[in-house]
Each structure stands twice: as structure tokens, then as C-alpha cells.
Image (cartoon, coloured by chain):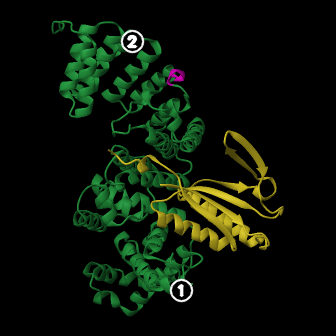
Amino acid sequence: MKFLMITKSIPGAPPPTPDQMMELGRFTEEMIKSGVVLLTGGLIRPSTGMQIRSAGGKISVTDGPYAETKELIDGFAIVEARSKEDAIAHATRFMKIVGDAEGEILRIFSSEDIPPH
Amino acid sequence: MAGPHETRATIDAIWRLESPRVIAGLARIVRDVGLAEELAQDALVAALEQWPASGIPDNPGAWLMTTARHHALNTLAHGKMAERKHRDLGRQMDALAGDADRIQTELAANMDDDVNDDLLRLVFIACHPVLSTEARIALTLRLLGGLTTEEIARAFLTSEPAIAQRIVRAKRTLADKQVPFELPRREELEVRLTSVLEVVYLIFNEGYASAVGDDWMRPALVEDALRLGRILSGLAPNEPEVLGLLALMELNASRAAARTDAAGDPILLLDQDRARWDQLLIRRGLAALARAKALTAAGVGGDSGAGPYQLQAAIAACHARARDPADTDWAGIAALYAALEGRAPSPVVSLNRAMAVAMADGPAAGLALVDALASEPALAAYPLLPSARADLLSKLGRLAEARGEFERAAALTGNKRLRVRLLARAAACGDVPPPERR
């Protein structure tokens, strides 16, 4: 099963040190090599993120309610895990490297979610 | 830092990912895969005891390896192995006594530099030709996929003791035949690699063929095989067939969601909703295929051109690239099947080639090739031969003959749903008298 993982830094938290960045790179490479991470990248959300909303046929786009802090680096990954617990284990290791941050683990809908009749 | 996430399930998840490296590292030192796995299990037991209280270490893989080495050193030093309930283990450890100095030195040295080579050795030994195909599959899922015997048993619809015994026997065979824990020599590399790729592809197909089941464990085999394929392509990034197999699996898996309808009936490739194909997997498959092609073009893997996996992946890629079935490069597919006939001849491949030719050059050209296969003994009871013939005959307006072939195909198939469909197509050919049998 696939999961979308999104992390965002907490405003005011210190930016990652070069050591942390190196460790993060090493971890990411390991997870790609072991076939867990299928796609990953950074998100420039804090300064340029936008929100789009559709309500009653009207589309509105607004700049996200994010702090204008350039140092914040957000990221995402699509991972393939055998279970929810596997996904949590991967995310836990990631979080231990990045330090203070918060994120979401979202299961991606797949054909397995359609019950056979 | 005990928390709700430091559960057994989380530790199992870490184990699944880290255990192959731990087992591989130990196997290099003790030169016995069964013993290495037992020693690695000791580290898992220690993790289960300590992590709930201490929290998961920052680098759990290194922790497991260090702990396993430590346990191995202790048991060697104190000769405790003989007391262990596992008699085999005691015997094996005793046998190693003469080699104790080397083993102790290597266990104490913290050499993790060649962990990739260790993993590759583990892959090759799990897929060693002295083992039966079933044993290779079970051992590969266990040692490299990190699956429990229970999980393997569920995936293969068999009992846990049966799988456990299969694995025990496999390890014993490796020990009895004194299969060395080393990379194959250059001259046997191709044969050994073929065995590895075959095992991974069998695991993939075991899951892929059971697209919709009551049990999610079988479809999960597709992901396990993909994971193994991705690991392999990281370990052997310059082997074109490793990348070819990975590309084939990623591309085939990309269609998983579109392969069956709501009732669980299979949907043929050309009738599938292509919007439901997984573009991420397609992209990954095409990237792996491009790397395989580049290696082949550079002359890696011999001068006989693309291998069977790469060719099958290239065929899958032709479909993946076509946004609409009408955009399919059928001439390209026909040429790839012709190449595949050369590399891995089989009547089924020839039949597929004939159908691609029919799509590229018209039903008459395809029919000529299909008719040439009519006397092929391997296809005598193969329902897809008459159904392919029927399809082409109906396109040529030879409805009476088509009807007879659809009925023949229906009689040959063991699949109830397919039989209903074939009989419906037979009926659609109209009520014309069947042709005289040739």
C-alpha cells in the first residue's frame, strides 16, 4: 500500500544543521534503494503556497496562511509500505533525523480498497 | 521515550527492512545462512525486550547489527551454544570452533563497508540452483523480504508448518552441499542471475495473477517483488536484465487498478480505463527500461542484444506510452515479439506476435501466422489459440468459421467467466451452419 507523507517545519524551530541535512540525505538514499520511497521532493510552501477552493461554483485562490519564513523547508514522499505500522516506522525514523516538525501520513487509495462483490 | 508507536508492529516493520542486511553481514562472518539468521533473531529478541522501554534507536539497523555481533561473540566465548535448545545451532557453532579466532576478529571489527556485496551474496544463496523453486521463493521472501513464515504461508495459501519446514530444509541443503557464501564467478554469473530474476518474477506473478482476492496478502506479493526488484537494481545497477525485470514489474503493476471491474471480472488491456493506470509506476518503469536499454546499447551483458525481461518491458512500455489504445505502436510491438521469439522462443510468444502483426498489418497477415501455429503441440489445449483465430476470422467476415473457433475456445477454457464471454461472442457471429471440419 502506498502512503503520501508530508512534513512541515514548525515556525520558529531552528533550521536543520549541515549534519542533519547529510544524515537526511543518507537516510533518503537508503529508503530509495530499499524500494520504500517511490518519489520524494521538497515543497516551497511557506513563501509561495496557495490555497484553491471551490464553493458554489466559485473558484478562489488565496496565498496560503503560512508564515513568510524562507528557511522553512517542507517535504513530501510517496512510499510503499506493507502496512500502516511499516509506514509509521518509516516516518518515525525520518522525524528523528529532522527534529522538531509535524507531518501527515495519508494512505493512497488503491484497487485493494474496493471490496470485491 | 516509550510511546504508543513503540509497539511490536513497529519493531516488526523495522525488522522487515533491516534484517536482510544484518543476516547478510553475519552470514559473511559465520559462513552459514541458517546460523546467521538464528543470530540475527537473537538481536530481534533483544530489540523486543529493550525498545519498548528505551525507545527505538536513531539507527536501528546499526543497533541490531551490533547487538547480533555481541551475542554471537558472547556465545562463542562462553561456549553456550551447545546448551541451546536448538540442536542444529549447537552443532554448527561447534563446527566453527576451529575457526573461532577469525570469526571473533571479524565479529569485533566493525566493517560495514561492503554491506551491498553481503546483500548480493545473500540474494544469490537464497536463489541458489541447488534449491527447488519453491524453496528459493520461500527463502528469498524470508531472508530478503523480511517476511515471517506465517506471512509467506498466507501468501501461498499453505500452512505455516509447511513453509517453516521448507525453509529449514533449504537451509540444511545449503549447509550439506557446502554452498559458499560468495558472489558467483564470472562464468556462472548469467545462470545464477537468471535464477534470481526468475524467483523475483515468480513472486510478482503469484501476487499479480490473484488481483482480487479475499486476502490482501496475495496482492501484497506484488509489492514485495517490486521491493526486491528495486533492491536488486540498487545492488546490481549495471545488469541490464535486473533493470529489465524491474521495468517489467513496475509497468505491469501500473495497470493493477484497471485490470478488473467492480464484479472482479478481468478487463482486457485494450478495454481498460487508462486514466486508472498509475503514472508514477509507469514513469519509474520507463526510467528503468531506459537504463537497461542504455546498458545494452553500451554492450553490457554481451552482444546478443536486449534480454527477455527487457524485451517484455519494452512491449509493456509500448502500451504504457499509448494514452489511447488507437495510439499503440503495434508495428513496434510486433518487432519486439519477434526479437523475443529469438531470445526466448515459445509458442505463446509466437501467438502474441501474430496478434500484434494483425493489429499492425491487418487480420489476414495475423491469421497467416496464427494458422502456422495450429499444429504446435504445446498449444493443442490452449484456449487462446482458437479464440485468437476466431477473433481474426470474425474481423475478416468469415463468421461461420469464427463461431466454430469461439466454441472450441469456450470448450477448452477452465475459466467460467471467460467461457461465458466466448460463447456470447460465438452467438454474436450469427446462426450460420458451422463449416465443415478441415
Q: In this view of the protein, which residue sits in the foreground, B331 or B191?
A: B331
Residue sitting at the far bottom: B78
Q: Is residue B51 left or right of residue B218?
A: right
The reply to whether the magenta stretch includes residue B316 is no
Q: Position of residue B67 (x, y in %)?
A: 49, 82
Chain identifier for the yellow-coloured part of the image: A
Residue under circle 2? B363
Where is residue B49? Give x, y as percent: 43, 85
Where is residue A67? Give x, y as percent.
81, 63
- Identify the secondary structure beneath mark 1: helix
Q: Quadrant of the N terminus of chain B?
A: bottom right
Residue occupying the point 46% across, 76% down: B7
Q: Is residue B379 visible in this depiction of the protein?
A: yes
Residue identifier under label 1:
B54
- Chain identifier, green in the render: B
Under circle 2, the secondary element is: helix
Count of numbered badges drawn on the protein: 2
The Cα atoms of the two marked residues, 2 and 1, are separated by 70 Å
Three-letter code, disc 2? Pro
Chain-order first, disc 2 or disc 1: 1
Magenta range is B325-329
